[in-house]
Image (tube, helix red, strand yellow):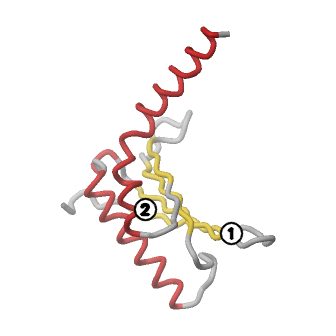
Amino acid sequence: MFTLGILASGTLWFFWNVQMMPFMPLQDALVAEFEGCSPRVDGGQRKGQKGTPKILRVVMRVPFDPTSSEPSVQSQIETRLIRTEELARKYVVTDDFEILELHLFNEQKEQTLRQKTFTKQIDLARP
């Protein structure tokens, strides 16, 4: 039992350091920029699909309905998309990624989860 516990802890530590740690500075920056957004950042290619573009995925909670077509909401979404790309350029090696996927979700108590994904090509020529 003791050996199993050490093995499980070692596996989790390895996963955390290899998969999650490169994105922690970006997650911290997103928390500072957008209060209460609870971001999760990861990146890479889709599993089992060689030759697909490398994607930087950012999932975050928003205080508005991302599926709404109101101009004020669209403006907030565009602001988050632009600012997320700026922060990604600062805290992650964006040359490794071709696409930025921003998954926004809003959860209301006892209502359906509202979510929408926004995709943006990362311009490698931009500094």
Does 24 appear above or below 61? above
Q: Residue placed at 56% from the left, 33% from the top? A: 48
Mark 2 surroundings within 10 Å by alpha-carbon count, few (fewer than 14), some (14 through 19), many (20 or more): some
User: Who is closer to the viewer here, 34 or 41?
Assistant: 34
Q: Quadrant of the C terminus?
A: bottom left
Q: Earlier in the sequence, mark 1 or mark 2?
A: 2
Height in image: 70 above or below 65? Answer: below
Left or right position of 31 against 116: left
In x, y percent, where is residue 114?
Answer: 68, 70
Q: For the point 55% across and 71% down, which residue is it?
A: 62
Residue 109 screen position, x and y as percent: 76, 71
Residue occupied by mark 2:
31
Quarter of the image with the N terminus in it:
top right
Identify the residue position indicated by label 1 in the image.
Answer: 107
Which residue is most to the left? 127
Is 11 positioned to the left or the right of 51 in the image?
A: right
